Amino acid sequence: MKQSIEQLLIAHGKEILLSPGMQLEKQFIQHGSISCFEHSIAVAYISLWLVHCLRLTVDLRSLVRGALLHDYFLYDWHEKDSSHRWHGFHHAKRAAKNAKRDFSINPIEEDIIQKHMFPLNLALPRYKESIIVTCADKFCALCEVFSFLVYRFNEQHLLGGFALPQHV
Ligand SMILES: [Fe+2]
Ligand SMILES: [Fe+2]
């Protein structure tokens, strides 16, 4: 990998990371004390790390964008609300619907989002990018639930010279 994982994350994920919808994810807790925003970055990061370690050839842009949007359901699933019932089974579909509304996503990105809950959702991932994100998501979720890893991303560092929405 010629570029570092951070550089790839920014090169391919900048538009999504800076979007109002993605910024909204900071308000929603995913597991433990980790926000949905942090979880999504971690999944994208681990996905890129797996590609690097396993020397895989993949569509890096789709991998990063799909990973960042895989949990783009945009609500706090801990809150009791009838629309959040069976979150584990339904949120991938909701995330894909929101992603299609807010971004122009390609078939690989859509498959990553739709299938990331395999095998809980029985539909088989169609692309290797989807399989990678599914594995990275499970690894990150386990780390978060059992507090094996606590990651905090320094947004200013990660996004470097890019203006954040509130400053635009
Ligand atoms: Fe998910
Ligand atoms: Fe996830």
Image (cartoon, rainbow, N blue to C red):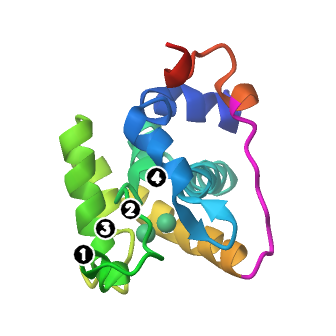
Q: Main secondary structure of the magenta part?
A: loop
Mark 1 and mark 3 in contact? Answer it, CB < 8 Å: no
Q: Which label belongs to residue 148?
A: none
Q: Say whether disc 4 or disc 2 marks the residue closer to the N-terminus.
A: 4
Q: CA distance from mark 3 to mark 2?
A: 12 Å
Mark 1 and mark 2 in contact? Answer it, CB < 8 Å: yes
Q: Which residue is mark 3?
A: 92
Q: Which residue is mark 2?
A: 75
The relative height of residue 141 versus residue 62 in the rendered view (above or below) is below
Q: Label 2 amino acid?
A: Tyr
Q: Which stretch is magenta?
A: 146-155
Q: CA distance from mark 3 to mark 4?
A: 12 Å
Q: Label 3 amino acid?
A: Ala
Q: Is residue 78 magenta?
A: no
Q: Secondary structure at mark 1?
A: helix
From where the camera sits, is residue 58 visible? no
Mark 4 and mark 2 in contact? Answer it, CB < 8 Å: no
Q: Which residue is mark 1?
A: 83
- Give the number of the mark in front: 3 or 4: 3
Q: CA distance from mark 4 to mark 2?
A: 18 Å
Q: CA distance from mark 1 to mark 2?
A: 10 Å
Q: CA distance from mark 4 to mark 1?
A: 24 Å
Question: Mark 3 near ligand 1 (CB under 8 Å)?
Answer: yes
Q: Secondary structure at mark 4?
A: helix
Q: Label 4 amino acid?
A: Ala
State the image coordinates of residue 75 (x, y, percent, origin top left).
Answer: 38, 62
- Give the number of the mark in front: 4 or 2: 2
State the image coordinates of residue 137 (x, y, percent, origin top left).
Answer: 54, 67
